[in-house]
Image (spheres, grey):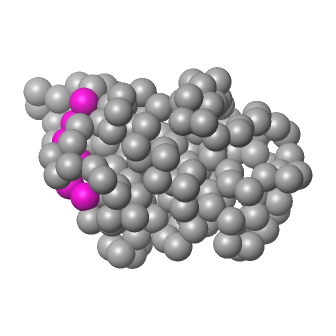
């Protein structure tokens, strides 16, 4: 659901081979970027659901970016609710509408890092770029790789073994975002 070319450009800039393709033939890593609505994105992914699940279960690295992170979870309450890929336990919820805060949340926010694998070489207090109206609520606190705050504290990044996700856009987060993408691609 969009954002494919900017993620590809960032990966190519880092010197890695990347392709936008309709199957996982020959893939060693999978990145699911996204901008848009959860249910519509799941319609596009439905024909590949079993292939994505088998890819993740094989131990090969999977990363979701923004909507892509949300799609990794079991369910979203967006627009009445939709089933997700179910690679991570949890639910996607709307950001609360709090006085003085606009939704969607757009802008640079600080990360509170918990997982050093994804954030190897990233300084504490680094900022990344967000554009979102929903956030992931993890069942397992151990799956939260980093948090950020926008009215509430929310998972800014998740990681369970080989399945990673960033609610923010690393491809739009300058040097910090490129370093995070490099960590995933080198893993």
Q: Residue drawn 33% across and 66% down? A: 115
Q: Specify start and end residues of the magenta stretch as a single range.
A: 108-113
Using the rendered view, name the quadrant where residue 103 is placed: top left
Report x, y in % for residue 101: 17, 29
* Residue 130 visible in the current orientation: no
Q: Where residue 51 sits: x, y (%)?
A: 82, 59
Q: In this view, does 83 lie to the left or right of 174?
A: right
Label total for image: 0
Report if residue 126 lies within the magenta region. no
Apparent side of residue 169 relative to residue 124 in the rendered image (left or right): right
19 sits left or right of 186 in the view: right
Residue lying farthest to the front in this orientation: 15
Q: Which residue is drawn at 62% across and 61% down?
A: 61
- Residue 70 drawn at (x, y percent): 51, 49
Q: Can residue 122 be seen in this view?
A: yes
Q: Quadrant of residue 155?
A: bottom left
Residue 113, image quadrant: bottom left
**Quadrant (top left/top right/bottom left/bottom right) for the C terminus:** bottom right
The chief SS type of the magenta part is: strand
Q: Position of residue 124 (x, y in %)?
A: 17, 52
């Amino acid at each position: 659901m969009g954002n494919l070319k900017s993620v590809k450009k960032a990966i190519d800039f880092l010197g890695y081979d990347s392709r936008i393709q309709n199957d996982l033939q020959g893939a060693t890593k999978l990145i699911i970027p996204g901008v848009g609505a959860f249910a519509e994105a799941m319609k596009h992914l439905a024909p590949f659901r079993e292939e994505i699940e088998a890819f993740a279960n094989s131990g090969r690295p999977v990363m979701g970016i923004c909507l892509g992170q949300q799609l990794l979870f079991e369910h979203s309450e967006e627009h009445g609710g939709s089933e997700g890929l179910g690679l991570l336990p949890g639910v996607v919820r709307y950001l609360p509408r709090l006085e003085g805060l606009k939704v969607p949340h757009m802008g640079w926010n600080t990360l509170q890092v918990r997982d050093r694998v994804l954030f190897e070489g990233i300084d504490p207090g680094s900022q990344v770029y967000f554009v979102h109206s929903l956030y992931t609520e993890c069942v397992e606190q151990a799956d939260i790789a980093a948090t950020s705050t926008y009215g509430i504290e929310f998972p800014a990044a998740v990681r369970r073994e080989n399945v990673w996700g960033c609610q923010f856009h690393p491809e739009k987060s300058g040097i910090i975002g490129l370093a995070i993408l490099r960590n995933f691609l080198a893993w």
